[in-house]
Amino acid sequence: MKKQERLRTSLSEEIEEMLNEQVMKEAKSSFNYLAMSAWCERRGFVNSAKFFEIQSDEERQHMKRIFNYISSVGGTAITPSVGKIQQEFESFRSVFEIGLDQEIEITRSISRIVDKCSELKDYTTANFLNWFLGEQVEEEAIARRCLEIFDIVDQQGLGFLMIDREIALVRDQAQPPADA
Ligand code: OFO
């Protein structure tokens, strides 16, 4: 059956597997951001809660974009299981550090798929993934800017309040990728 299905798609088994793994990573990122949003909300950091909620929605869009691509080129898109999601965080700052690490890992993961696409001459998928590479430049810049705010502002009492206010502005100030 598997062989029969492969005859109907130009997608190699290897790339299909990597794309499905990426679907899972985007879904996990979405849930991670949702947990971060709830953590911020519980501590009264309402702007940061909103910030992470938006991030979560975006990751879900990314997941769907890849999921739909797999289907549209005749592959088998797999609904992901994401495992356990971290709900508690050491500090306000650590939430943003984890966010940046997550974005960096996603960038590397997409780059690995693009590498594999070059090796297998799958230019269609490489072209599809280009959009994600542009998006990652923006997302990493946003996450780094958030951490810069922590570096600039004194991290206690009123400082936390200022950080939370500044976080509300970060997405508006970010430059969109050229082809977004
Ligand atoms: Fe979809 O991982 Fe970032 O934005």
Image (tube, rainbow, N blue to C red):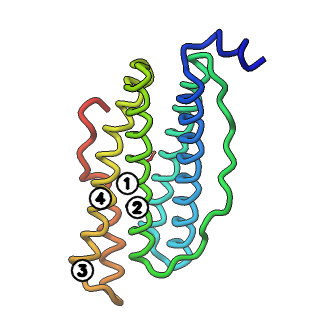
Instruction: Report, in whole angstroms, how far the alpha carbon at label 2 lies from the one at label 1.
Output: 5 Å
Instruction: Examine the image and state in which quarter residue 84 appears.
Output: bottom right
Q: Which of the pair 102/153 is nearer the observer?
A: 102
Residue 1 drawn at (x, y percent): 78, 17
Q: Which of the pair 171/141 is nearer the observer?
A: 141
Instruction: Report, in whole angstroms, how far the alpha carbon at label 3 lies from the one at label 1.
Output: 24 Å
Residue under numbered circle 3: 153
Question: Residue at the spot x=69%, y=38% of the render?
Answer: 79
Instruction: Report, in whole angstroms, how far the alpha carbon at label 4 lies from the one at label 3.
Output: 15 Å
Q: Is mark 1 within 8 Å of ligand 1?
A: no
Q: Is mark 4 within 8 Å of ligand 1?
A: no
Indicate the quadrant containing the C terminus: top left, top right, bottom left or bottom right: top left
Which of pointers 1 and 4 indicates the residue nearer the eye? Answer: 1
Residue 38 drawn at (x, y percent): 57, 68
Q: Are marks 4 and 3 in contact (CB under 8 Å)?
A: no
Give the mark nearest the N terminus, 2 or 3. 2
Residue under numbered circle 4: 170
Question: Residue at the spot x=29%, y=52% of the render?
Answer: 172
Q: Amino acid at mark 1?
A: Ile
Instruction: Report, in whole angstroms, how far the alpha carbon at label 4 lies from the one at label 2.
Output: 18 Å
Residue under numbered circle 1: 104
Instruction: Label 2, secondary structure: give it.
Output: helix
Give the mark nearest the N terminus, 1 or 4. 1
- Residue that extends furthest to the right in the rendered view of this protein: 1
Q: For this view, does 133 lie left or right of residue 178?
A: right
Residue 152 drawn at (x, y percent): 21, 77
Q: Are marks 2 and 1 in contact (CB under 8 Å)?
A: yes
Q: Amino acid at mark 4?
A: Val
Instruction: Label 1, secondary structure: give it.
Output: helix
Q: Residues within 10 Å of mark 1 (few under 14, many from 20)?
A: some
Residue under numbered circle 2: 101
